[in-house]
Image: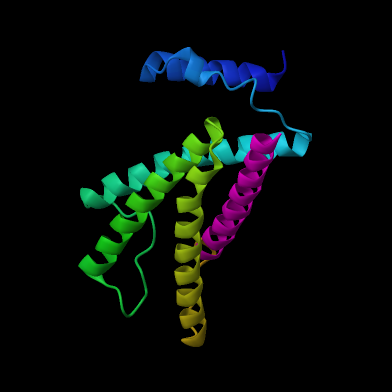
Amino acid sequence: MTIYEQISDQFCRVVHTNLKIPLSYCETRSHWKFSKSIDTMIFFYTLSFGILRVILHFIDLVNIYFRGMRLRRPSNLLILRGENSRGFRVLKHLLMLKAWILVIYGMVFIKPHYINPFVVLSIIILTIDVFVLVLDILRKARIPLDRRVTLWEMMLNLCCVFYVQWILKQQIQY
């Protein structure tokens, strides 16, 4: 039994006991067949990062809702301040939370069409972030390192999700 099958069995056991999903719906070992080890690595990277992002988006939502301490620096945008910024951040985190949950569901149960909302939302958010970054460059504002890293992380995740979606579509065809 490979490590992949062990992880799959553990996931199946957790889904069965905690979510009361029958084992017949949960057995994915016969469906997940990766042709290369890089496919397996990218698949599990994306799956584990998706779970992490769900947790972090949920924490950010709770933090914004209770107006707790800021996890990020305050926005230095001229257009969005105070309640407007808070409202957009809540909307962004809520939509991305739902999108990552759909990505995880689509990956686990091999349904690549559930990944499409994440792709659309990520492209929209990435476009807005790049537009704001260009505005900051034109204003000659200082761009913090965490903001640049966040943009690279979003692009890397989007590429990995695209690749996983392609892998899942290939598995459905064969």
Residue 162, percent across and down?
Answer: 61, 51
152 and 163: which is toward the camera: 163
Specify whether residue 141 is in view. no
**Residue 156 placement, left or right of 20:** right
71 and 60: which is toward the camera: 60
Residue 58, percent across and down?
Answer: 34, 42
Q: How is the image coloured?
A: rainbow
- Magenta segment: does it hold 148? yes
73 and 114: which is toward the camera: 114
Q: Main secondary structure of the magenta part?
A: helix
Q: Is residue 18 above or below residue 40?
A: above
Q: Which residues are magenta?
A: 147-174
Q: Is residue 102 above or below residue 91?
A: above
Specify whether residue 62 is in view. yes
Residue sitting at 60 percent across and 21 percent down?
A: 7
Q: Is residue 9 above or below residue 67?
A: above
Residue furthest right as drawn: 36
31 and 43: which is toward the camera: 31
